[in-house]
Image: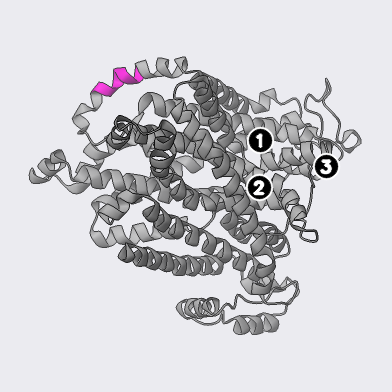
Amino acid sequence: MFAYVVRRIGLGFLVLILAISSLYILVQAAPGDPASAMLGPRATPAIKEAFRERLGLDQPLPVQIVKYLWSVAQGDLGTDLKSKQPVWNTLAIHLPRTIELLAAAIVIAAGFGIPLGCMAAVRRNSAFDRIVGVLSVSIIAVPAVVIAIYGMLIFSAGLGWLPAIGAGEDGGILSILHHLILPAIAVGIGWVGYLARLVRASMIEVLSANYIRNARAFGLKERWIIYRYALRIAVAPTVTVLGIGVGIMLGSAVFAEIVFARPGIGKLMYDAVILRNYPVTLGAVLAATLILIVSTTLSDILNAIIDPRFKESGE
Amino acid sequence: MTQPAIDSPAAAPQTRGGFWRLLRDPMGAVGLTIVVALILSAVFAPWLAPYDPAAINVPIKLQPPSWDHWLGTDQLGRDVLSRALYGGQIALGVALVSTCLAVGIGMILGMAAGFGPRWLDNIIVLSFDTVRAYPVIILALAVGPIFGAGIVTIIGILVATSIPYYGRIVRTSIISAAKSEYVEALLAMGMSRTRIVVRHILPNIIGPILILASMDIPTFIAAEAGLSFLGVGVKPPTSSWGLILDDGYKFIRQTSWLVIAGSVPLILATLGFTFLGEALRDTFDPKLRKEV
């Protein structure tokens, strides 16, 4: 197990280095001169040259990449062109809001999706199972941006039940939660359907396993068998799926943050892109990529811990 | 999936029967109807659209639906129905081209990784892992403006980020097929690796890959609309469901019709293709259900 954890973290680290390097190359390979793009059309050749020299853009690409990786490792992501503050300071304000949103979305997805999938599997082929099946597929298909806008249209602009903008950071915890409801639903509701289907399929497979039949033969209570033995195995794939799904959720979070004018990585990037604030844009992509790599690595390790079969095989 | 290609002729009658089974599945029938209707409306948009989708007529801006403008008008007085019909061309076009390219390139790289030398496999798999490390929408938001917003950029981003998905599936299938006895026999008979992959392994994995690809179409449609909504996709005056949605969001306090006009075709398209993809998978390859 220890060897697997070390190997998995090592792979995550390697992928992070490659991802940062690739992003740097991609930005450099883009058509047009970054100095012209950042300084605008009025910049003179001398100013552009000084700018290139200051950023190290006049050096060979491998040197630039190593220097960039080194500065990222030291937490130096450049300077926010708008606030003139280090990019890291800007990210530190917005990142917790996005993590808060993702966490709330995962709570909604797991809180509704896992019980629904479990109940559908236990009542296989019943009307409940069919309704959950159709609703799951339908809800997966609706894009997060549409759910966010309809949420705002109905519950904020129409009924006035929930706030339309902001994250409620000036109020107390209740205000934050109040502001979190609609964006979290927009990000997480599709995953309710996805997890319900996944858990259903997984539970059906587990419930037909020999050890469950044995548990029944020993006269254990059905409720005990389902929740203590079957569901524990059946939820293992959801951990992996949620880990990988964080990437898609980050995309949905961009829409939710923009629609609800909510501070976060997505909103920060959107504003930075409009202002051509490249250091912030790159910093935000790196932060999002880091979140995704950490979540996939953690989910793989968690999956190994949850699933007892993993411990036995060691793979 | 890993049976020799010699069995493949038997699949033909099953496919014909499968089509009727697909239609008998309510989800399949609904999905197919929506998809066919959307394709027809997109193909015949120039004849179906009552107005030029880019024709500005400010005096009649933000009108609710009427006999003259069935879905109303936007903030520039453009006919929303015409824009929605032409938006279908963009959505379906981007999804189709992205899917074909992602599947094609993913298959080539997957085959190279699965049946090529170990070092090539390692490089390709590591590249796949690196690309998958980026959250797609966030990467698109950053890279889109650098390369210039537009259809080509959207397709490029969608293809680049989807290749690893197909590549990995093909690689796994090929590695699994390579261990089978019939491949060992063909190798022993002196057949080249390329010929074995193209003639014997590929025909067995192409079906499931195409079904998975059909299930990815709604993701591409939603991504195009989403990126256009964010301003890094299709640029005005070209019409896109995402742009209509963006207009609707900006003028949400004045009218809700724009949001409805932009979202309903988008929801229908994603639902239709999802239903069809699910039914296709259940009908032609139920084994995939578990793998997905």
For mark 3, name the chain.
Answer: B
Numbered label attached to residue A184: 2
Q: Nearer the viewer, residue B75 or B55?
A: B75
Q: Main secondary structure of the magenta part?
A: helix
| Figure quadrant of residue A146 | top right
- Colour scheme of the picture: one colour
What is the x, y in percent for residue A164?
79, 47
Q: Which residue bears the numbered disc 1?
A: B87
What is the x, y in percent for residue B164?
41, 51
Please provide the residue range marked out in magenta: B10-16
In the visual, does B54 lie left or right of A100? right
Image quadrant in which the C terminus of chain A is located: bottom left
Residue type pointed to by label 2 = Ala
Q: Label 1 vs label 3: CA separation?
A: 19 Å
| Residue density around tag 1, few if under 14, some if 14–19, many if 20 or more, within 10 Å | many
Q: Which residue is drawn at 82% across and 32% down?
A: B73
Q: Can residue B230 be seen in this view?
A: no
In the visual, does B84 lie left or right of B12? right
Q: Is residue B43 above or below residue B237?
A: above
Residue type pointed to by label 1 = Gly
Asked whether residue B117 is drawn in magenta, I would say no
- Give the structural element (helix, strand or loop) at label 1: helix
What is the x, y in percent for residue B150?
62, 50
In the visual, does A86 lie left or right of B194? right
For mark 2, name the chain.
Answer: A
Asked if both marks, 2 and 3, belong to the same chain, the answer given is no
What is the x, y in percent for residue B117?
23, 58
